[in-house]
Image (cartoon, rainbow, N blue to C red):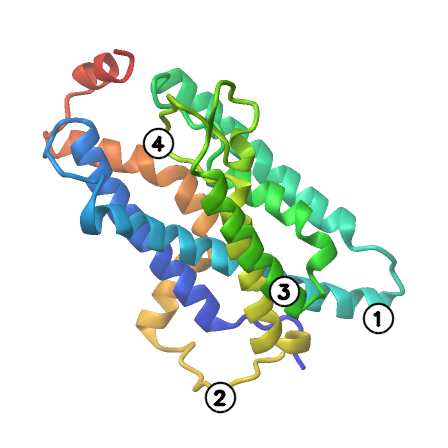
Amino acid sequence: MDIHQRFWEIDVLRGLAILMMVTYHLMFDLDYFGIYSLNLSSGTFWIFPRIIAFIFIFLVGISLTLSYSRADIIRKDQGKNSLFPKYMKRGVKLLILGLFITLITWIFIPQDFIVFGILHFIGIAIILEYPFLDKKYLNLVLGIVFIIIGFIVAQFTVNYPWLLWLGLKPSVFVTVDYFPLFPWLGVVSLGLFIGKVLYTKYKRRYPLPDLSKNLVIKIFSFLGRHSLIIYLIHQPILIMVLYMLGVLDLGNLFHLLNY
């Protein structure tokens, strides 16, 4: 067993998701900046970003299973104790990046800034899921329960913003990115369950040809391995591309963002 191997299918699926995300955000920018009108609040355009989010967050669960299996093998070989500091550090890092995104969006789009977006969520989820990383069927049950709770909570509104992270929103709440713990923690739990089923003890439990040398697979794998940095930089790049193509005026842009 090679504990340093990567499972190319996971990288490819994440790479596909990041490409889908960039495509959707391009459509979002075209509509948001008034370049081309699109109805993103219904139909296919409404479903598309939720499919992307589901793939990303589901893969968080599977990746946590793989990471924990590999780290547990190393821990036993080296006689180490708890792995919690490793996951605490990773979660806090993502949470800090999420807070940075909050600051940037608060400066540039104060009317729609991100309070609890996907990076905030993943950072907290990594920490909260640590006690369940070695569980199997419990994660299946928790996944279903968390998703049901999420749908129930979404039916209510409150008069304060302090429970946004759980899924309880004020009646007037606008943001461009929102991923509360419920129901999305349930998707992570389902990913943990599937990861435990398909990749027990860091071994693939299903037959799959080795396509890792295929050029297309390598491209998507590269995107998947660098999904975080792509997430962080793709919007500024998209805006600059639109500006260079002459369809976006930066002067009007800053006026619009601070309107």
Q: Is residue 229 above or below residue 240?
A: below
Which residue type carries mark 2?
Pro
Which residue type carries mark 3?
Thr
| Distance between mark 3 and mark 1 Cα atoms | 18 Å
Q: Nearer the viewer, mark 3 or mark 1?
A: 3
| Distance between mark 2 and mark 3 Cα atoms | 19 Å
The residue shown at (54%, 54%) is 186
Question: Where does the image place residue 116, in percent across and percent down from the top left?
Answer: 49, 32
User: Is label 2 in contact with label 4 (beta carbons under 8 Å)?
Assistant: no
Q: Can you identify the residue that label 4 sits on? A: 176
The residue shown at (61%, 41%) is 124
Which residue type carries mark 4?
Val
Q: Is residue 198 left or right of residue 48?
A: right
Q: Is residue 10 left or right of residue 174?
A: right
Q: Earlier in the sequence, mark 2 or mark 1?
A: 1
User: Is label 2 in contact with label 3 (beta carbons under 8 Å)?
Assistant: no
Mark 1 packing: few (<14 Cα in 10 Å), some, or many (20+)?
A: few
Q: Nearer the viewer, mark 1 or mark 4?
A: 4
* Residue 230 visible somewhere in the drawing: yes
Question: Where does the image place residue 75, in percent across and percent down from the top left?
Answer: 81, 64
User: Is label 3 in contact with label 1 (beta carbons under 8 Å)?
Assistant: no
Q: Nearer the viewer, mark 2 or mark 1?
A: 2
Q: Can you identify the residue that label 3 sits on? A: 65
Q: Nearer the viewer, mark 2 or mark 4?
A: 4
Q: Quadrant of residue 248?
A: top left
Q: Is residue 57 above or below residue 66?
A: above
Q: Quadrant of the C terminus?
A: top left
The residue shown at (71%, 44%) is 88
In the picture, the disc for residue 207 is: 2
Q: Quadrant of residue 19?
A: bottom left
| Distance between mark 3 and mark 4 Cα atoms | 30 Å
